[in-house]
C-alpha cells in the first residue's frame, strides 16, 4: 500500500476532528537558568568551562584536551585545528579526530542539551570525534525546549542536532558504554 493511499483512507475514516488547544504550553522556568544549565550538563556527563573575558579559545581547548593530536574545526578563532571539516574531501577523512570544536546556538537548562546547527560541510565532526568541545554564549541559554525551538532557524545546510553530554548506552546487563554512537567526552565552553 502506498503512503498516499493509506493517508487517504485515514482521512476518509476520520469522523471527529479536534482543533489544537488554544492555550499555549508553558514550559518549566528556572530562577537561575544558567546555573540550572551548568548543573544539567554535569549530570549528563559533560565538563563545563566558564570562560573569562580575554581567554584564548585555543588555550581553553588545549587545556581541556592536552593529549589531543588531531583537532578538527572550522571556527576562525581555533587556529590549532589540524583538520577543517569544510576542506576534507570526504566525511571519512575526519576519522581519528581526537577533538572536534563547534559552536552551539542554544543551550537548554531543563535537560542540558545544546542545539548545534550544521555550519560545516562535513557534519560528521560532531559525531566521529573522540571528544567534542562546544562553544556557547551564556546569553543563549534558555529554560526549556519550547523556548529553544522558538529560537532555532535552519541555514542552507538544513541540518542541526541537539547534543547533551557524551554519547552513552547501556545493555540489558546494565553495562554502560561511553562513546558508543558519538563523542566519549563533551566539554562546553561558556563565553
Image (cartoon, helix red, strand yellow):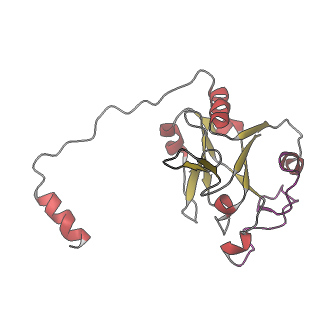
Q: Taking 60 as reference, is 39 above or below it?
A: above
Determine the image quadrant of residue 182.
bottom right
The x and y percentages for residue 125 are 69, 62
Magenta residue span? 64-89
Position of residue 50 measured from the top left corner of the image (x, y, whole percent): 79, 35
Task: Between residue 52 and residue 182, name the one nearer to us.
Answer: 182
- Quadrant of the snapshot with the C terminus: top right
Of 46 and 117, nearer the camera is: 46
Query: Image quarter for residue 179?
Result: bottom right
Residue 100 or residue 137, whichever sits in front? 100
What's the magenta bit mostly, secondary-structure-wise?
loop
Please tell me which residue is depicted at 29% across the width and 34% down the height of the picture.
22
Q: Residue 71: x, y in percent?
A: 81, 61
Residue in the picture at 68% in, 65% down:
120
Instruction: Locate residue 111, reporting x and y percent.
Output: 56, 37
The magenta stretch spans residue 115? no
Does 72 appear in magenta?
yes
Amino acid at each position: 500500500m502506498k503512503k498516499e493511499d493509506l493517508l487517504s483512507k485515514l482521512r476518509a475514516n476520520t469522523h471527529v476532528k479536534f482543533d489544537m488547544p488554544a492555550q499555549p504550553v508553558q514550559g518549566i522556568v528556572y530562577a537561575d537558568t544558567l546555573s540550572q544549565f551548568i548543573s544539567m550538563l554535569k549530570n549528563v556527563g559533560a565538563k563545563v568551562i566558564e570562560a573569562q573575558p580575554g581567554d584564548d579559545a585555543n588555550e581553553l581547548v588545549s587545556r581541556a584536551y592536552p593529549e589531543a593530536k588531531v583537532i578538527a574545526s572550522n571556527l576562525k578563532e581555533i587556529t590549532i585545528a589540524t583538520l577543517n571539516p569544510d576542506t576534507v574531501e570526504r566525511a571519512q577523512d575526519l576519522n581519528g579526530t581526537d577533538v572536534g570544536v563547534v559552536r552551539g546556538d542554544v543551550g537548554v537548562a531543563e535537560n542540558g542539551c545544546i542545539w548545534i546547527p550544521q555550519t560545516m560541510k562535513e557534519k560528521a565532526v560532531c559525531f566521529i570525534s573522540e571528544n567534542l568541545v562546544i562553544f556557547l554564549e551564556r546569553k543563549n541559554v534558555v529554560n526549556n525546549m519550547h523556548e529553544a525551538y522558538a529560537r532555532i532557524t535552519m541555514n542552507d545546510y538544513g541540518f542541526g542536532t541537539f547534543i547533551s553530554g557524551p554519547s552513552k548506552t547501556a545493555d540489558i546487563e546494565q553495562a554502560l558504554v561511553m562513546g558508543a554512537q558519538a563523542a566519549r567526552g563533551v566539554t562546553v565552553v561558556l563565553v
